[in-house]
Image: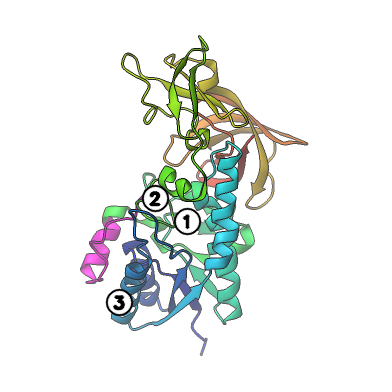
Amino acid sequence: MNQKIKVYVGMSGGVDSSLTAALLLEQGYDVTGVYMKNWTQDLPGMICPWADDLADAKRVAVQLGINFKVFDFENEYKHKVVDYMIEEYKRGRTPNPDIMCNQEVKFKLFLETSLEEGADMIAMGHYARVEDGVLKQAVDTNKDQTYFLYRVTGQALQKTLFPLGEFTKPQVREMAKARGLYTAAKKDSQGICFVGKVGIRDFLSVYVEQKPGEIIDKSTGRVLGHHDGAIFYTLGQRHGLEVGGGLPYYVVGKDMDKNEVYVTTDLNDDTLWKKTVGLASIHWINEAPVSGTYQIRVRHRAPLVSANLMLNEAGVELDLSNAERAVAPGQSVVIYNGSICVGGGIVV
């Protein structure tokens, strides 16, 4: 008699990971639920929801009758994800902590720890599909999370299950409700991946000293107002400038050394639009693609656009079919070949 395949499911206390565990149990896997304790720190005006999330994950595990563990990755998470994010912002760039979390914690540290403890595979509640180590977009294109998964390795994906990739979010809610799962009606978390509803400005304010500076009209050089720190602004930003009436202003650049933010009312400003994008820190999930035409996504939920990809010594150069707005340094651009996510890189 074949032994059951042992799967460790990352359970965050949300409906997606709860249903993931339930479905795998129904499919005959030997399921263990695991809560990753990545962040427990409260912030001013915001209590970190980790204790509530842990309690919800435990409740679902009890409901399902599966074993439950807690992996404490807080130190590694602070070093690999949070410190990385803060340093990137200090350099005037726009990082994505969710992508780094997947690369360093969920599909590396969690996978390695699970395998060491005797698991054969891991599973997550991500909206994505995997076939023989190949990452594919989810059926629900609105919820598809392959953008955040492009830095995961093909080897890790060989050991990963994504049961929700074939379903839409409304279907997941209904399936969880039909099974009476405790988290069936729980709202999805918003904001920074590890903190919850707090915004990036509020989070950075805890770690970075506010440094007042000038907001300058790029076309005239006129000082329009003042800010609390260039670090808090990103390319294309409109809200939070507070520089008076008339046409809205948009951030088109910043000088971190001078602590100056440059703005314009011209939506067609060349700085706001990019038709050629250079990428570094390239990661291919499996083998590198050949030069040619692919589809790219410049941010989560942005539409896929066609681009000609050219490999060079520095990384990748993309020639876009249409210019894209507010492609900021530090941001990830993810590359697709049809439904397959092949990898991507970070905007230079």
- Residue 158, position as x, y percentages in the image: 58, 64
**Which secondary structure lies at badge 1?**
strand
> How would you rate the neighbour count of disc 3 (Cα within 10 Å): few for under 14, some for 14-19, many for 20 or more?
some
Label disc, if present, on residue 129 of the rendered structure: 1
- Residue 343, position as x, y percentages in the image: 60, 46
At label 1, the amino acid type is Arg
Residue that badge 2 annotates: 139
Q: Is residue 174 magenta?
A: yes
**Which secondary structure lies at badge 3?**
helix
Label 2, label 3: how far apart the Cα atoms are = 29 Å
Label 3, label 1: how far apart the Cα atoms are = 27 Å
In the image, farthest residue toward the right? 313
Please report the residue visible at 60 percent of the width from the left and 27 percent of the height from the top.
258
> How would you rate the neighbour count of disc 1 (Cα within 10 Å): few for under 14, some for 14-19, many for 20 or more?
many
Vertical position of residue 54 compared to residue 46: above or below: below
Q: Main secondary structure of the magenta part?
A: loop
Answer whether labels 3 and 1 touch (C-beta < 8 Å).
no
Answer whether labels 2 and 1 touch (C-beta < 8 Å).
yes
Compare marks 2 and 3 and give the one earlier in the sequence.
Answer: 3
Compare marks 3 and 1 and give the one earlier in the sequence.
Answer: 3
Label disc, if present, on residue 59 of the rendered structure: 3
